[in-house]
Image (spheres, grey):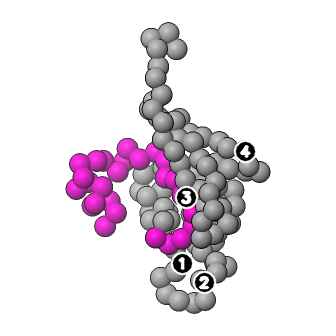
């Protein structure tokens, strides 16, 4: 369903290089393992979310055996926030800066995209 939806929008899933995880809930990261396997994309996440992401949601506050709250575990390839250090990704002239924000779990974060300007000499 994810792959078909991407294609329906006119994009090629094989062009996906990064998958960002703002926080580890099934509705946010449930497809990350699939996309990573399909495309070889790398997964980027806040340090506080690594264990939750890589465990498939085991131990989260609502992990009480309710079907559908877990996901296929996926390895984090890039840690975006560690010890309040803000790290970023630079992709095709766009700077994605990760910022930690209070959310419904420990490592909630978001990425702010800012277009960069390149001169002919840079």
Badge 1 or badge 2: first in the primary sequence: 2
Label 2 – label 3 distance at C-alpha: 19 Å
Look at the image and tell me in which quarter the N terminus lies: bottom left
Q: Earlier in the sequence, mark 2 or mark 4?
A: 2
Q: Which residue is mark 1?
A: 70
Mark 2 vs 3, N-terminal side: 3
Which mark is nearer the camera, 3 or 1? 3
> Which numbered disc, 3 or 4, marks the residue that appears first in the sequence?
3
Q: Residue at x 47, y 19 (%)?
A: 118
Q: Which residue is mark 4?
A: 85
Q: Is residue 23 magenta?
A: yes
Residue stretch in magenta = 1-27
Q: Are marks 3 and 4 in contact (CB under 8 Å)?
A: no
Report if the CB atoms under discs 2 and 3 are less than 8 Å apart: no
- Residue linked to disc 2: 63
- Is disc 4 surrounded by few (<14), some (14 to 19) or many (20+) residues within 10 Å? few
Q: CA distance from mark 1 to mark 4?
A: 29 Å
Nearer to us: label 2 or label 4: 4
């Amino acid at each position: 369903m994810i792959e078909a939806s991407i294609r329906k929008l006119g994009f090629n899933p094989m062009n996906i290089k990064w998958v960002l995880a703002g926080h580890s809930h099934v509705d946010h990261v449930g497809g990350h393992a699939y996309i990573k396997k399909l495309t070889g994309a790398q997964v980027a996440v806040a340090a506080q979310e690594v264990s939750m992401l890589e465990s498939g949601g085991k131990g989260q506050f609502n992990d009480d055996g309710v079907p559908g709250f877990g996901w296929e575990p996926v390895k984090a390839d890039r840690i975006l926030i560690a010890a309040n250090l803000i790290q970023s990704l630079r992709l095709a002239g766009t700077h994605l800066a990760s910022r930690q924000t209070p959310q419904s779990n420990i490592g909630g974060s978001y990425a702010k995209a800012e277009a960069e300007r390149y001169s002919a000499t840079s």
